[in-house]
Amino acid sequence: MRMMLAACVAAALAAAVPPAAAQTAPGSEEIIKKLEPQPRTRPRSRSLKPRGVKVEEGPNIDAPPSINLYINFEFNSDKLGTDAQIVLRNLGQALKDQRLAKFRFTIAGHTDAVGDAAYNQTLSERRAKAVQDYLVFHYGIDVQRLKSVGYGKTRLLDAAKPTDGVNRRVQIVNEGEGS
């Protein structure tokens, strides 16, 4: 009986784990690789006449480099959760690295589609600002290099599952060299 009760409690706790805790935090090197602009190269190919060749669309090379980070906040709050410090430590180290030091970044807060649109908009803005403030205070990142914006539930990562936790994220976008 105790074993069955323990198994039920463990299953319930596992189901309640937010996306950030379910994934390992990307290291600073992984963040740098995602945010560092890559040189443009032209694909080398000959004719693509219909010979049973399947052409798949690759990544959008015109989109700026970015990474989605799953940063835990307290429920309905912009207060950073304790495990958020691990992700933000890696982000802070990456942004201080010489390979990214000359670039400006947008910190974009996103929510899922649960709740009122206006509330989610405000919450996403406050969360993006909390990340910006943390990076400036704890890592000395120049505030001029960072811009915080919130998108609420307007830019879902998985529109097919609008209430899924994967949509609750902070996106870091490389906006190019700063002045």
Image (cartoon, helix red, strand yellow):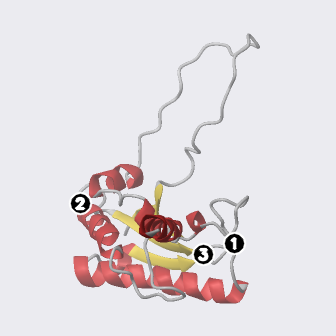
Answer whether residue 109 is visible to the viewer in this image: yes
Q: Between 66 and 118, which is closer to the camera in this rendering?
A: 118
**In this rendering, is residue 105 above or below 73?**
above
Q: Quadrant of residue 103?
A: bottom left
Question: In the image, what residue occupies the spot 38% across and 81% down?
Answer: 81
In the image, 56: left or right of 147?
Answer: right
Q: Earlier in the sequence, mark 1 or mark 2?
A: 2
Q: Earlier in the sequence, mark 3 or mark 1?
A: 3
Q: Pointer 1: residues within 10 angstroms few (<14), some, or many (20+)?
A: some
**In this rendering, is residue 100 above or below 10?**
above
Q: x, y percentage for residue 92?
A: 28, 69
Q: CA distance from mark 1 to mark 2?
A: 32 Å
Q: Which residue is mark 3?
A: 111
Q: Earlier in the sequence, mark 3 or mark 2?
A: 2
Q: Quadrant of residue 99?
A: bottom left
In the image, 165: left or right of 52?
Answer: left
Q: CA distance from mark 3 to mark 1?
A: 8 Å
